[in-house]
Image (spheres, helix red, strand yellow):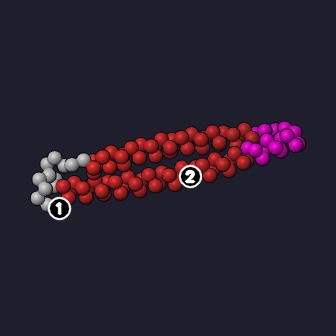
């Protein structure tokens, strides 16, 4: 593969990877917003329990909200791991783009 073909393939790959990083970042933001909403529910339930005492429904609602928060935190961590891996793939492509093609003879731009 000549230098222009190699470079074009790497640039196309980089574009795909950047789109993936962007999608993963959007997913992470969505998950963090969802987590923040659930944390607000937890605080609201804790305040309600503090004000009116612990009844079975409030305690159950609090427990369920805490479970949802824990699940979202795990999803956030997994998404962050995928972002790190995708960014590493971009770095690999960037290194390949920066490296000279040893098979290229310079006869084409």
Q: Is residue 93 left or right of residue 76?
A: left
**What residue is drawn where x is 20% and y is 57%?**
5
Disc 2 from disc 1: Cα separation: 42 Å
Whichever of labels 2 and 1 marks the residue nearer the N terminus, that label is: 2
The residue that appears at 59% across and 41% down in the rendered structure is 73
Quadrant of the snapshot with the C terminus: bottom left
Tell which of 46 and 22 is nearer to you: 22
Q: Which residue is mark 1?
A: 109
* Magenta-drawn stretch, dominant element (helix, strand or loop): helix
Residue 82: image location, x then y, percent: 45, 44
**Residue 36 locus on image (x, y percent):** 66, 48
Q: Horizontal and vertical percent for residue 52? A: 88, 42
What secondary structure is marked by label 1?
Answer: loop
- Residue 60 lies within the magenta run: yes
The answer to whether residue 43 is visible is yes
The segment highlighted magenta reads 42-61
Q: Is residue 59 left or right of residue 96?
A: right
- How packed mark 2 is, by other alpha carbons closer than 10 Å (few <14, some 14-19, many 20 or more), is some
Q: Identify which residue is drawn at 69% across, 45% down.
A: 39
């Amino acid at each position: 593969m000549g230098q222009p073909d190699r470079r074009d393939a790497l640039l196309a790959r980089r574009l795909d990877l950047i789109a993936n990083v962007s999608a993963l970042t959007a997913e992470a933001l969505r998950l963090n917003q969802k987590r923040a909403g659930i944390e607000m529910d937890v605080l609201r339930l804790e305040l309600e329990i503090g004000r009116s005492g612990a009844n079975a429904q409030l305690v159950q609602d609090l427990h369920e909200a805490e479970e949802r928060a824990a699940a979202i935190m795990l999803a956030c961590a997994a998404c962050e791991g995928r972002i790190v891996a995708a960014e590493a793939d971009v770095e690999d492509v960037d290194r390949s783009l920066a490296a000279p093609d040893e098979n290229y003879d310079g006869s084409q731009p």
